[in-house]
């Protein structure tokens, strides 16, 4: 089905396109093995290097991944659906459930690493939380794992002046989590701002999230505001982009 | 300031880390030239290949970019802020302004390519818009350019049965755009769902958006619902991730 237009493109690109179409049409499903170099050489009458380049295109796009000694496979994309607005609704954390429950549905998202410390506020954090230079923050660093695969790094910053002595400074914040405790302290979050970016991971992020080649990270910076627009928490999150769909539902 | 811990890491990685810190601290600002291979070789006492690898790390992360014959520069990140919720508020499109105005602030975002056609609905679109197999959709494909750089590809799908004969089928949809026309047709959008993913671009997307190496795309699929939950538009957007911050503001 080569057209004049197609013929001007490099062969490896045309082979990659046909494989991508076969994946998008469902001919190859998530986890299926793609034709190997030998099969592509025979089917398309090309050199090994061309076949290899075609598979590299799909790996670079994050559509396929190599498994050592087994070949190249269609990447599974069965992401978590993170509902940005419903999951923060008061009825969730107000009733003692963690705000993460909505992400999980029937899948097991667990915290496998948590550290809590008191630190001088980084400049960008101090500015948003409106802190003086010498003020400290409670820093909660967590890593979340789904099916044993790390998918999310989250670092929360809260003013020490607000949270000192509360369970927020403990590893286990108790029922309803940080937001329920903030409410008890008189700083109930009533408004949220989420800012989203995407970029390639640093080496550290890639290592911590066990990210495959060709997978970006999504950065979410969430700021929680109590009454009168007082910012009470900043949560900087780094998500494995291959593991997440973010969803925001809202009325006009 | 090498620590025992640092010493176990490869040299190129430590050099990359120190450059990254210098960028984050503001020592090198957006558009500044970073030290070249010769300077890094002299400053750190390393081989050319090590210096080159250090710069490659930053380029791969999208923090820096090469300019031919001129060196390696800190990537400018002066993104558009796309406010997902406010920009769709009725007061905006209801009063004759385009929903895109809120993105632009004082910067000039223009449509440089637009095509409108009637097509059979792709399966995924027909399913969400609840169409029969033979139903067609009005497809509006647009490319948006900021400061002559393409930043956004948007393809909207609307049921022909809803929009036939209206300005939505023209290149210029008139004051207030598609949503004002839908309101006039009795299908005023009252609810929106935005779903967000990120991945590396395909070759086509990279070409259409003139994307630099190491830059992912953000995908937004927005569905607009009229009364009684009737879906009336799907807009599939592909954004240059280096050009955008998405923002969602909402109450608890």
Image (cartoon, coloured by chain):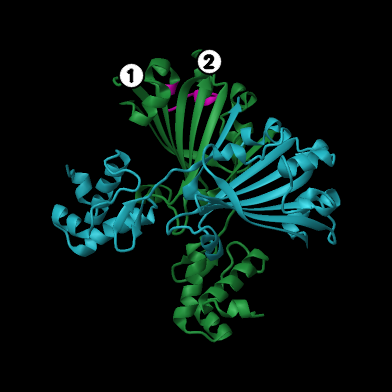
Chain colours: A green, B cyan
Q: Main secondary structure of the magenta part?
A: loop
| Crowd around label 2: few <14 · some 14–19 · many ≥20 (10 Å) | few
Point out which mark residue B221 bears. Answer: none
Q: CA distance from mark 1 to mark 2?
A: 19 Å
Q: Quadrant of residue B123?
A: bottom right
Q: Is residue A191 left or right of residue B23?
A: right
Tell me residue B162's x, y (percent): 84, 48
- The residue pinned by badge 2 equals A228
For the C terminus of chain B, the image quarter is top right
As helix, strand or loop, the secondary structure at mark 2 comes to helix
Residue, x 57% and y 34% (percent of image)?
Answer: B248
Range of magenta residues: A168-178
Question: Mark 2 falls within which chain?
Answer: A
For the N terminus of chain B, the image quarter is top left
Residue, x 45% and y 57% (percent of image)?
Answer: A212
Point out which mark residue A132 bears. Answer: 1
Residue A170 falls inside the magenta stretch: yes
- Above or below: residue B71 compared with residue A122: below
Question: Mark 1 falls within which chain?
Answer: A
């Amino acid at each position: 089905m080569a057209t004049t237009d197609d013929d001007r493109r490099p062969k490896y690109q045309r082979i990659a396109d046909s494989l991508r179409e076969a994946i998008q049409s469902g001919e190859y499903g998530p986890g299926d093995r793609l034709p190997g170099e030998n099969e592509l050489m025979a089917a398309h009458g090309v050199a090994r290097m061309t076949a290899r380049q075609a598979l590299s295109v799909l790996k670079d796009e994050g559509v396929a991944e190599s498994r050592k000694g087994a070949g190249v496979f269609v990447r599974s994309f069965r992401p978590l659906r993170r509902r940005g607005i419903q999951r923060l609704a008061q009825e969730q954390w107000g009733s003692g459930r963690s705000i993460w429950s909505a992400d999980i549905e029937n899948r097991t998202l667990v915290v496998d690493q948590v550290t809590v410390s008191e630190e001088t506020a980084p400049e960008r954090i101090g500015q948003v939380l409106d802190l003086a230079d010498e003020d400290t923050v409670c820093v909660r660093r967590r890593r979340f794992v789904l099916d044993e695969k790390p998918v999310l790094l989250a670092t929360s910053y809260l003013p020490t002046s607000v949270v000192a002595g509360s369970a927020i400074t403990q590893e286990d914040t108790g029922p309803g989590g940080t937001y329920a405790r903030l409410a008890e302290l008189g700083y109930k979050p009533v408004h949220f701002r989420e800012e989203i970016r995407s970029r390639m991971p640093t080496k550290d992020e890639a290592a911590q999230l066990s990210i495959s080649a060709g997978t970006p990270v999504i950065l979410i910076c969430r700021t929680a505001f109590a009454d009168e627009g007082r910012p009470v928490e900043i949560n900087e999150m780094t998500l494995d982009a291959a593991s997440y769909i973010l969803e925001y539902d809202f009325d006009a």
